[in-house]
Amino acid sequence: MLRGSCLCGGVVYRAEGPVHHASHCYCTMCRKQHGAAAGSYANVPSAGYVIERGAALVTEYASSDEGRRGFCSVCGSTLFWRSTQEPDCIAVTLGTLEPEYAGPVDVEWFPENKPRWLPVQQ
């Protein structure tokens, strides 16, 4: 089971079920939403995603025809990405997890958009 919260602590969630895969997405929308080099996610079954506290604080934004992004309306923390084509899966943001995600990140989406300023691992 994964547990997470937003920066202000107003939203607390849990995600039960296996992690299908974890990813870094370098698409323009994820980069803008996160304000970072990538959006980092763990994909889990949406049936196991439960907001334990602060559901009224969660706002969803339809960033495209394919997906919706959930965030805390108080502090702005990005909480999840949800596909409109595959409603049985939800992608929770790795940066909101407590404790830190310990599994592998095995997928990079849109690596051709990886920013040049991202440090090279040596």
Image: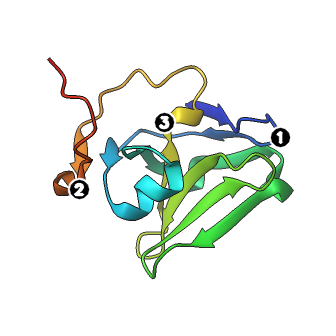
| Quadrant of the frame with the C terminus | top left
> Residue 71's x, y, as percent?
66, 54
Q: Residue at x 79, y 36 (%)?
A: 8
Residue under circle 2?
113
Q: Residues within 10 Å of mark 1 (few under 14, many from 20)?
A: some
Mark 1, secondary structure of its residue:
loop
| Quadrant of the frame with the N terminus | top right
Label number found at residue 94: 3
Q: Residue at x 76, y 45 (%)?
A: 75
> Residue 9's x, y, as percent?
79, 34
Q: Is residue 36 left or right of residue 57?
A: left
Q: Residues within 10 Å of mark 3 (few under 14, many from 20)?
A: many
Mark 2, secondary structure of its residue:
helix
Q: Is residue 24 left or right of residue 98?
A: left
Marks 1/2 in contact by CB < 8 Å: the verdict is no
Which label's residue is closer to the chain start, 1 or 2? 1
Q: In the orientation shown, which residue stands out farthest toward the bottom?
A: 65
Residue type at mark 3 is Leu
Work out whether 116 lies above or below 47. Answer: above
Label number found at residue 10: 1
- Estimate the spatial distance between the alpha carbons at disc 3 and disc 1, rounded to whole Å: 18 Å
Marks 3/2 in contact by CB < 8 Å: the verdict is no
- Estimate the spatial distance between the alpha carbons at disc 1 and disc 2, rounded to whole Å: 33 Å
Residue type at mark 1 is Gly
Residue type at mark 2 is Asn
Which label's residue is closer to the chain start, 3 or 1? 1
